[in-house]
Image: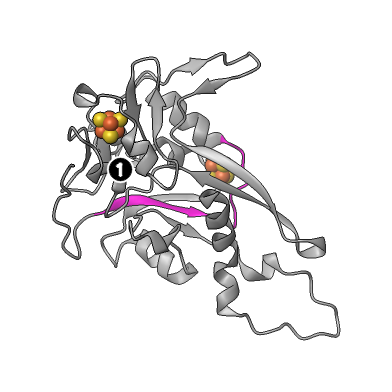
């Protein structure tokens, strides 16, 4: 068992805010992540049979695309999935060696490869499937929020962002301190009704998802019908549906 650092209210909690309303599923974030991390802090990210019949590899960020709804109300939803840097991460507390840990100073969850024994307990514990085992070197790897970019004094200030945030062509991805209620990302979450993934599990993910806007989920109103008042319960409908898919 590995202990978690104390996490008083207001402590820095770096994370991502992902807007499911405007993600177009282009995979730019996933490929930029792979490219940066193949040469950076967690390098190399290996591939097996990349051009064969059973390609496998280490990807910290994966995009899932789903059809949601029926008829005129149907839409395709693209759902990027990576480590959520939970406030109470099961992947850390289950680790027998202390290799998995959560940083007190900024909340980033990392793996110390030097003491990881590759037991995979953390990947079994993570309900979001965010851990990636590198069979080539026998250790667990994961999203670091590009820790070697965000604190890198050799980069211009405007480039000290996770690679996925830098490249997203629709600006669906945002990075910041979600422990600060006055930060730009926290205000965005409050304004758009940002949601936790599977909050009922109690791991308190730091990353937040912004749900698709309701007027884009519903069928186009007929000309004679006044628009119906939005039902707040509907705002969570899509994320509840994603929860069910991830829970299978
Ligand atoms: S695979 Fe490594 S990081 Fe994961 S629980 Fe085992 S020792 Fe800890
Ligand atoms: S780069 Fe942006 S738009 Fe493309 S898949 Fe990632 S989050 Fe979605």
Is residue 22 shown above or below 169? Answer: below
* The quarter of the displayed image where residue 202 is located: bottom left
Position of residue 239 relative to residue 135, above or below, is below
Identify which residue is drawn at 41% across, 62% down: 199
Q: In the rendered view, would you say 29 is above or below 178? A: above
Q: Callout 1: 10 Å neighbours few (<14), some, many (20+)?
A: many
In this view, the residue in front, 36 or 47, is 47
Count of numbered badges drawn on the protein = 1
* Location of residue 243 in the rendering, given as x and y in whole percent from the top left corner: 52, 56
Residue 74 appears in the picture as rendered: yes
Residue 169 appears in view: no
Magenta span: 13-27
Q: Taking 167 as reference, is 86 above or below it?
A: below
Q: Quick check: 4 left or right of 219?
A: left
- Is 139 on the left-hand or right-hand side of 195? left
x and y percent of residue 101 in the render? 21, 40
Query: Under 8 Å from ligand 1: the CB of mark 1?
Result: yes
Q: Nearest the camera: 25 or 185?
A: 25
The residue under the point 22% across, 33% down is 153
Which residue is at 15% across, 46% downward?
A: 3
Q: Indicate yes or no whether the magenta region holds residue 117.
A: no
Picture coordinates of residue 170, whole percent (x, y) = 57, 47
Where's residue 210, x and y in %? Answer: 50, 60
Quadrant for ligand 2? top right
In terms of depth relative to the viewer, which is nearer, 136 or 37? 136
Q: Which residue is mark 1?
A: 91
Q: Residue at 43% of width from left, 34% of height from top?
A: 60
- Is residue 24 magenta-colored? yes
Is label 1 in a helix, a strand or a loop? helix
Quadrant where the N terminus is found in the figure: top left
State how the image is colored: one colour
């Amino acid at each position: 068992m590995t202990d978690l650092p104390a996490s008083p209210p207001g402590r820095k909690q770096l994370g991502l805010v992902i807007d499911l309303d405007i993600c177009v599923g282009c995979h730019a974030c996933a490929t930029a992540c792979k490219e940066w991390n193949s040469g950076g802090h967690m390098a190399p990210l290996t591939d097996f049979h990349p051009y064969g019949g059973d390609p496998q590899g280490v990807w910290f960020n994966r995009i899932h695309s789903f059809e949601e709804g029926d008829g005129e109300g149907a839409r395709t939803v693209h759902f990027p999935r990576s480590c959520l840097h939970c406030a109470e991460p099961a992947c850390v507390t289950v680790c027998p060696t202390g290799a998995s840990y959560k940083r007190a100073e900024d909340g980033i969850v990392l793996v110390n490869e030097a003491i990881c024994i590759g037991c995979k307990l953390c990947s079994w514990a993570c309900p979001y499937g965010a851990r990636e085992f590198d069979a080539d070197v026998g250790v667990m790897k994961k999203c670091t929020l590009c820790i070697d970019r965000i604190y890198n004094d050799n980069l211009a200030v405007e480039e000290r962002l996770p690679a996925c945030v830098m490249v997203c062509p629709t600006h669906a991805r945002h990075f910041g301190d979600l422990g600060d209620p006055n930060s730009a990302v926290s205000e965005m979450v409050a304004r758009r009704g940002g949601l936790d993934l599977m909050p009922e599990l109690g791991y308190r993910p730091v990353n937040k998802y912004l749900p698709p806007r309701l007027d884009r989920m519903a069928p186009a109103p007929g000309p004679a019908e006044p628009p119906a008042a939005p039902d707040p319960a509907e705002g969570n409908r899509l994320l509840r549906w994603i929860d069910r898919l991830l829970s299978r």
